[in-house]
Amino acid sequence: MQRACGKAILLGEHAVVHGVPALVVGLDRGVEAVALPAPSASESTLSINHDLVATSAQDHDLALAFRALLAEAAPPSPVQVQVASALPVGAGVGSSAALGVAIARALAEAFALPPSLDRDLAHALSWERIFHGNPSGIDTAAAACGGCLLYTRGSPAEPLRLRSPLSLAIAYSGYGSSTRTMVESVARQKERRPAVFAKQLDAIRSLVSNARLALEAGDLVGLGKLMDLNQMILAGWMLSTGEIEQLCALAREAGALGAKLTGAGGGGCVVALCDGDPGPILGAWRGGGFTCFASTVSSLRRGFAPWHRAMLAGKKIFLRIAVRKNVQERPCSARQREAAAA
Ligand code: MEV
């Protein structure tokens, strides 16, 4: 059984596509996958939450992504992959990246390959490209590593030590969006006004750099203000919506230290930084008719939440269930892995 977690981007989505560092956390809900070699079968199959969703012979996006991953992983025989996912699809919490990472890991496990973060990330990225075109890799890094990461495109993710666990609340705006479409719309703005766009990237670079310092110093009030500022730039890129603005306002009125869209925008989720108890923020969102959950992020190495076992037992888990457990952190560069093994 292999795992990968969902993600929330604290600061820097979209800018990360253009080379600016971003801050991302792994969520304590995600995906579990198991792969069984099926030597007598003619094609590989993928089931998610007990439904057969793709075979390697089909041509819809999920099947193409599955085939792309299989082409990279090159298993010696067809496989049956079974996945349990507790992440909403197209909502900005990294569902597709978590699926890609968990399946890549399950394939490696099924054929007794030694663990390799770089291999699993590369395989998961081939899956992600089918859905997102040219992803930065931030979602797959968070899915694979968990914890809190500083991520720069093309470089190994840098795990950050948190002074204290982060208490987050996450709400779904009610509809998803296409990451590919949102990334393309930002790219068009870059083409139209390159000088303005470059200044906006510089601004986000400073926000992320200050947010890193705030995180490491345990300055949550400062971190929240930086998230709010990032939301203003994202809204300027036309990535916010009425529902996202409403969720941010409700969260701030209920005591959030900061709130912003997370992921591609144009729908999807809002992440709010809580001052301890997420209860009042979740209550305000639920009062407004939104589904939401809480998540605690720690840089400590901890186990995954019990929802995995419930999913595999066939029970349905809804987004509105509040989970407050810590996430797993894995060393993310060769040096860090060696240090952890020593
Ligand atoms: C999507 O979760 C994050 C984006 O920055 C796209 C990417 O980094 O590939 C919008």
Image (cartoon, rainbow, N blue to C red):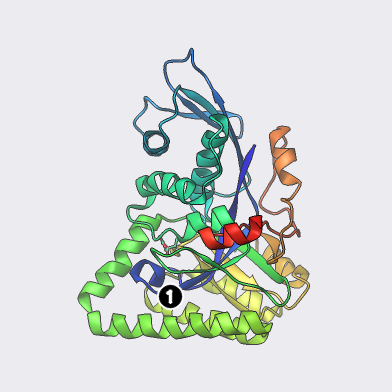
Q: Where does residue 71 sit, x and y in percent of width and height?
A: 36, 34
Q: Where does residue 104 sit, x and y in percent of width and height?
A: 50, 40
Indicate the quadrant containing the N terminus: top left, top right, bottom left or bottom right. Answer: top right
Q: Say which of 111 and 244 sits in front.
A: 111
Left or right relative to 336: residue 15: left
Q: In this figure, which residue is indicated by the disc labeled 1?
A: 234
The answer to whether any part of residue 92 appears in the image is no
Q: Residue at x 51, y 50 (%)?
A: 117
Q: Where does residue 87 sit, x and y in percent of width and height?
A: 59, 49
Indicate the quadrant containing the C terminus: top left, top right, bottom left or bottom right. Answer: bottom right
Q: Using the image, determine if residue 59 lies above or below residue 238.
A: above
Q: Secondary structure at mark 1?
A: helix
Q: Amino acid at mark 1?
A: Leu
Q: Using the image, determine if residue 133 lies above or below residue 114.
A: below
Q: Say which of 43 and 259 sits in front.
A: 43
Q: Residue at x 48, y 12 (%)?
A: 40
Quadrant housing residue 289: bottom right
Q: Residue at x 48, y 72 (%)?
A: 22
Q: Say which of 244 and 148 sits in front.
A: 148
Q: Residue at x 49, y 44 (%)?
A: 100
Left or right relative to 186: residue 109: right
Q: Say few, some or many: other residues with alpha carbon within 10 Å of mark 1 (under 14 / 14 to 19 / 20 or more).
A: many
Residue most extreme to the left: 192
Q: Say which of 160 and 59 sits in front.
A: 160
Taking the image in four quarters, ligand 1 sits in the one at: bottom left
